[in-house]
Image: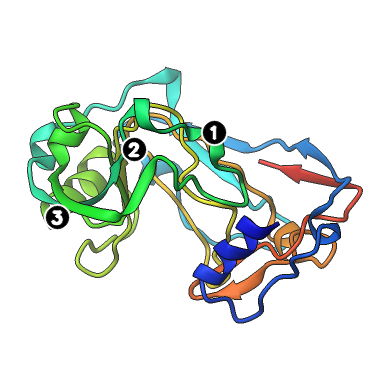
Amino acid sequence: VEPIYDQYSNHMHVVKPPASFEDWRSKTDFIPAQIGMTYYEQGKLHEVLKGWHIKKGEPGFHVYRLKDNEDVKMDMSFFDDKSVRVFDVKDQDNCTALTGTVLRNDNNCVNRYKVRISNGRDILDGTERNAYGSFTAFSEKTMDYLTKEVVEYPGTIDASMVENAFISNLHQSTITAQLHNNPISMSMAIQYIGKKTWLCFSAEDMTDRDGWATVPAPAAGFPSRAPKKDKMKYY
């Protein structure tokens, strides 16, 4: 319980969660849920993605992915820009990624107090090892290429206004974020290359008192207790 409580204190919660053992004990049966899937050809996402508005009663998750396991074709020269802020990641021999949980991110491998500016191309081609960029910013050149040429995203993502990029070449699977939610707006993510595993719950299960009962923090919400429901779907 103590490490979880410390994690909440670090995020300056408006309402601090209880720290008793019983609050974090759960007998909930977690059930895998089906996710809607739409396949598209590279460069034609705009043909199938018409908007982000979800009506009441509609599924809260939907995945758009390249058909026929098509590989993303990208020109790495558009990443050749030393402007990416990354955290240092310890060498594989000096850390283990097994200490993280869905309630606490892995601080054993990622050194969040050691930051450097790196070249995006060096990270992607493996020239620079053990780099992890979280909520970092890409250059306008990179963002224009990713959102207009690679997927033709039907909207605008301004690199100068929002630090919205994640980039890494982690040497092993690592938990990089504890369970949290965005209580302000709808969320979306575009993955261009590599592999990332997501664990998601519905908005109702995140906020219900019998669910994760999230409490507010700056621009995010975090679970205040383990779920008490009999059953809960995950995505």
Check the picture and name the quadrant holding the C terminus: top right
Question: Residue shown at 40%/40% (left/top)?
Answer: 109
Left or right: 93, with 31 as reference point: left
Q: Secondary structure at mark 1?
A: helix
Expressed as whole percent of the image width and height from the top left, the position of residue 157 reads 29, 60
Check the picture and name the quadrant holding the N terminus: bottom right
Foreground disc of the pair 3, 1: 1
Left or right: 22, with 169 as reference point: right
Question: Residue shown at 8%/46% (left/top)?
Answer: 81
Mark 3 nearby-residue class (10 Å; few <14, some 14–19, many ≥20): some
Q: Sequence-wise, which precedes: disc 3 or disc 1?
A: 1
Mark 3: amino acid:
Ser
Residue 98's tag is: 1
Question: Residue shown at 36%/20% (left/top)?
Answer: 70
The answer, for residue 144, to whether it is visible in the render is no
Q: Sequence-wise, which precedes: disc 2 or disc 1?
A: 2
Left or right: 235, with 42 as reference point: right
CA gap, disc 3 and disc 2: 23 Å
Q: Which residue is mark 2?
A: 44
Relative to 53, say whether 130 is above or below: above
Report how many numbered discs are placed on residues in the image.
3
Mark 1 nearby-residue class (10 Å; few <14, some 14–19, many ≥20): few
Mark 2 nearby-residue class (10 Å; few <14, some 14–19, many ≥20): some
Relative to 169, say whether 235 is above or below: below
Foreground disc of the pair 2, 1: 1
Expressed as whole percent of the image width and height from the top left, the position of residue 226 reads 78, 55
CA gap, disc 3 and disc 1: 34 Å
CA gap, disc 2 and disc 1: 39 Å
Q: Which residue is mark 3?
A: 139
Expressed as whole percent of the image width and height from the top left, the position of residue 36 reads 62, 38
Relative to the observer, which residue lies in front, 92 or 193?
A: 92
